[in-house]
Amino acid sequence: MKLLSVKETAEALGVSRQTAMRMIAEGLPAICLRSGRRKKVWRVREAALEGWLLQHEKQAARAHVGGRNGKVETLKGENANGANEIFKQ
């Protein structure tokens, strides 16, 4: 069982440390090893992180496939050059 620091968790997810802390506050399974006057020391089990990612990937996939009606959603947005593009998800 490997425990990841918040910094290691952030690097594994490709997000900032602050975003990783927000994810912990919003439900990413984590362990508080020490709660001092200044700060808490958090660790995330590597296996728990992988399970949490799989769960959220499935939820995101369901949302992008049209959710309840099963239709493919079409989004309109701008590309890097400022031109409008149609994106199918």
Image: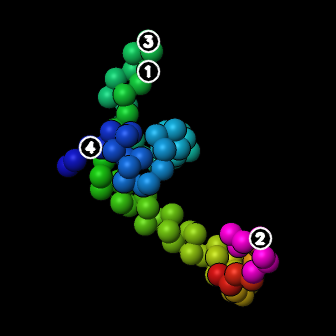
Q: Secondary structure at mark 2?
A: loop
| Residue under the point 78% across and 76% down | 83
Q: Which residue is mark 2?
A: 82
Label 3 to label 1: alpha-carbon separation? 6 Å
- CB under 8 Å between callouts 2 and 3? no
Q: Is residue 73 left or right of residue 48?
A: right
Q: Of the two numbered discs 1 and 2 on the same chain, state the one appearing first in sequence.
A: 1
Question: Residue 53's spot in the image, x, y percent?
Answer: 44, 61
Label 2 to label 3: alpha-carbon separation? 49 Å
Span colored in magenta: 79-85
Closer to the eye: label 1 or 2? 2
Q: Amino acid at mark 4?
A: Leu
Q: Is residue 20 left or right of residue 82?
A: left
Using the image as rendered, state which of residue 11 and residue 6 is in the foreground. 11
Q: Which residue is mark 4?
A: 3
Q: Secondary structure at mark 3?
A: loop
Q: Of the two numbered discs 4 and 3 on the same chain, state the one appearing first in sequence.
A: 4
Which residue extends farthest left?
Answer: 1
Q: Residues within 10 Å of mark 4 (few under 14, many from 20)?
A: some
Using the image as rendered, state which of residue 59 and residue 9 is in the foreground. 9
Label 4 to label 3: alpha-carbon separation? 23 Å
Q: Which residue is mark 1?
A: 39
Which residue extends farthest bottom?
Answer: 71
Question: Residue 31's spot in the image, x, y percent?
Answer: 36, 37
Q: Residues within 10 Å of mark 1 (few under 14, many from 20)?
A: few
Q: Of the two numbered discs 4 and 2 on the same chain, state the one appearing first in sequence.
A: 4
Closer to the eye: label 4 or 2? 2
| Mark drawn on residue 37 | 3
Q: Residues within 10 Å of mark 2 (few under 14, many from 20)?
A: few
Q: Residues within 10 Å of mark 3 (few under 14, many from 20)?
A: few
